[in-house]
Amino acid sequence: RLILATTTWLEEHPDIQADEIIEITPEELVKASLLKTPQEVLAIFEQPQYNYTTDFIKDSLCLALDDIQDPGNLGTIIRLADWFGIRHIFCSLATADAYNPKVVQATMGALARIHIHYTPLPAMLSKWKEEGIPLYGTFLNGENLYEKPLTPHGIIIMGNEGNGISAEVASYVN
């Protein structure tokens, strides 16, 4: 929607598009940014709202996050999911806000390519388990992921940093 950028950045990106583009000084950028040493551009985006169907889950791997608390961890997970080609992440309602500035920064742009869905995980997982969708859990005492063959579709569930996957969510792992 809005881009605030230095003269240098705007000259290097002449094709950039937004509803409004404002040229600002480096000093103004420092005042507007949450970072001590900001990049040469800030942008305001509309938070997307994504719908989902079971169809794409039957064709790809997705992530489910059970109460991830740390914004930096969430941002890193989103960035790694993007690198691995995962396009949908389902977050429990208690998971950190994906649009928290620390999360956005940690994603390094991956947030623009990943569809984030906040949903009550147990209800969603129950439905998908009934439909036969593979639900993989990440457990410290589990099998080695690199030795376990994964299907090309399903949900990989990751738990909270301190407590792992909750007992309720773990009960759906098949």
Image (spheres, helix red, strand yellow):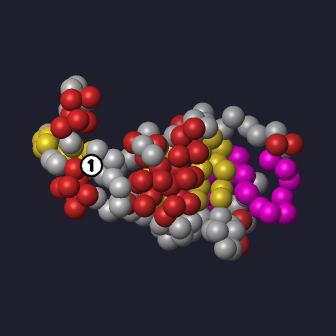
Q: Is residue 122 left or right of residue 151?
A: left
Viewer-closest of 3 and 116: 3
160 relative to 89, above or below: below
Q: Is residue 125 left or right of residue 116?
A: right
Across and down, in percent, residue 144 comes to: 85, 50
**Measuring 19% from the left and 46% from the top, which residue is drawn there?**
4
Across and down, in percent, residue 124 comes to: 56, 58
Q: Is residue 168 left or right of residue 110?
A: right
The reply to whether the magenta stretch includes residue 74 is: no
Across and down, in percent, residue 70 comes to: 53, 67
In this rendering, does residue 71 appear at all?
yes
Residue span colored magenta:
122-145
At mark 1, the secondary structure is strand
Q: Report the quarter where the C terminus lies.
A: bottom right
**Measuring 26% from the left and 49% from the top, which residue is drawn there?**
42
In this rendering, does residue 52 appear at all?
no
**Measuring 70% from the left and 61% from the top, which residue is drawn there?**
172
